[in-house]
Image (tube, helix red, strand yellow):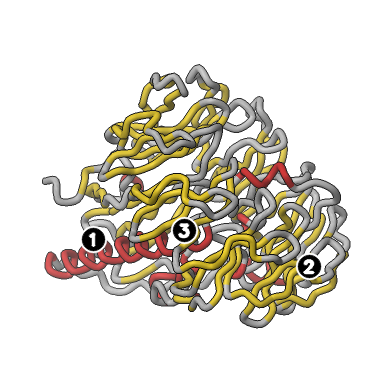
Amino acid sequence: MRASALPLIASVIALLLLYPAVAESQEKGKPLFPVEEDGKWSFIDKTGKVVVKPQFDDAWRFSEGLAKVKVGRKYGFIDKTGKVAIEAKFDAVWMFSEGLAAVNLGGTWKGPRIEGGKWGFIDKTGKMVIEPQSQIQLGVFSEGLARVQAGGKVGYIDRTGKVVIKPQFDEAGYFSEGLAYIKIGEKWGFIDKTGNIYITPRFDWAYKFTEGLASVLVGTKRGYIDKKRKMAIKPGFAEARPFSEGLAVVGVSGGKGTKYGFIDKKGNYVIKPRFKGAGSFSEGLARVKLDGKWGYIDKSGNMVIKPRFRGASEFTHGLAVVRLTSDDFAYIDKTGKFVWKPRGIEEKLAGSEKAPKEEKKADEKPPDPAAIAANEAHAIAALRTISSAQELYNARYGKYGTFKDFEKWGLIDAKLAAGKKSGYFFDVDNKDTSYSAVAWPVKPGKTGARSFFIDESGVIRYRSCKSLKDSLADSKSKVLGSE
């Protein structure tokens, strides 16, 4: 199983999460789900029955009745019978949204990003309705507009290909509830569909409106603003995710790292922070992480599927993707029952649960200040490498990636991908719209005196550590270079 081949997450488990929610609700009829075994992709129904035989080199989920597939080095679309709807002749394609899909002709893949070529839009018959141009089409249509990048700036086109908001923003998001977040210089705000500034750029980060509220960053704290331009929930969280089904995931930093809970639209806790990770509610359930494993809770905070997975996605059409090993995923229903899993996975899991051999203890040596400084410099450089890899991966897939993803594309070396290098451990934690990566000494005080943290802001933070209990830096730690 190729974990990095899954296009819908930053790792295998987010198979259901890559593309914007704008298209999620538009997929009607009998849902089908992509699976891979023995190097070929097929599609199953909700019962786990294979309904489209294995034949593709890669496959994505259905959107508006068509699914993106890869045949050799080219991309096309199939319908739900498995019949080719649009020939695989493009060098890259995006999903269908609002009846159109972006396609690339002549581009070259450089790791997770395609460079060059020309981008245009096709309809569901494969007809080119917006002729290819030497511009980078970013994503899909949402509320009648699609992002387009030219000259390093982002603007928007309509369904005819006409530029209706000229490229002028440093960054910009999809339109949601009539507004889109944009970045001008170092500040974030919102525009309306005429391109006029609706909320003045004054935030340090912002994300899309959902259910009438948008997450914003003020300094180092996140809160929520409403469409009346008022701070509906004052900044006080380390993380603040979009509202879904009336609740939002928020993170609160403490002495033992960030813990996650859920708040309502008044900012009151409905489920207090107690999880090491959490995802938004979808179809009544939310994924949460406890003791290194993922499970699912209901809106009362009750654990309805016990934490036992290495990763988990949101439920969509009654099923969720769960990660069983670094390379293998499966589908479960809302009772936690497996609907589909790879052949031979039980034997593989049994083998992976064998106790590892104990490492021989080397003679203890006194700390070497020069070695510690060198290790810390390597750790800082590695986090910057991870940050660059996340940017590249996010630009291609719309979500953040895993170490395995980065290694496949040649963005990081094998040692860093394994999570241990130059006296430091490394780990990355991906959320729906954010990520964080940490580096901490293998032997605090001996291989390194500080741990380090970086997230999507690109800012590296650190904290001193004397033992594993106090080793992890987080979003509240000191900014590197601010001493």
As displayed, is residue 14 above or below residue 269?
A: below
The mark tally for this picture is: 3
Q: Amino acid at mark 2?
A: Ala
Crowdedness near tag 2: few (<14), some (14–19) or many (≥20) residues, C-alpha within 10 Å: some
Residue type at numbered disc 3: Asn
**Whole-Å distance between the Cαs marked 2 and 3?**
28 Å
Label 3 CA crowd tier, 10 Å (few <14, some 14–19, many 20+)? many
Q: Amino acid at mark 1?
A: Gly
Location of residue 80 with respect to 202 vertically, above or below = below
Residue 174 screen position, x and y as percent = 51, 44
Q: Please name whichever residue, 84 or 122, is drawn nearer the observer in this view of the structure.
A: 122
Q: Which residue is mark 2?
A: 85
Q: How dense is the environment of label 1, judged by Cα within 10 Å: few (below 14), some, or many (20 and up)?
A: many
**Which residue is labeled 3 in the image?**
394
Q: Is residue 160 left or right of residue 386?
A: right
Q: Secondary structure at mark 3?
A: helix
Secondary element at image label 1: loop
Q: CA distance from mark 1 to mark 2?
A: 56 Å
The numbered mark, 2 or 3, whose residue comes first in the sequence reads 2
Q: In the rendered view, does 328 fall on the left or right side of 318?
A: left
Q: Is residue 249 above or below residue 369?
A: above
Q: Nearer the viewer, residue 332 or 145?
A: 145
Find disc 1 in the rendering and name its residue. Answer: 448
Mark found first going from the N terminus, 1 or 2: 2
Against 175, is 77 above or below? below
- In the image, is 114 to the left or to the right of 236? right
Distance, label 1 to label 3, CA atoms, is 31 Å
The one nearer the camera, 215 or 264, is 215
Residue drawn at 27 percent across, 50 percent down: 459
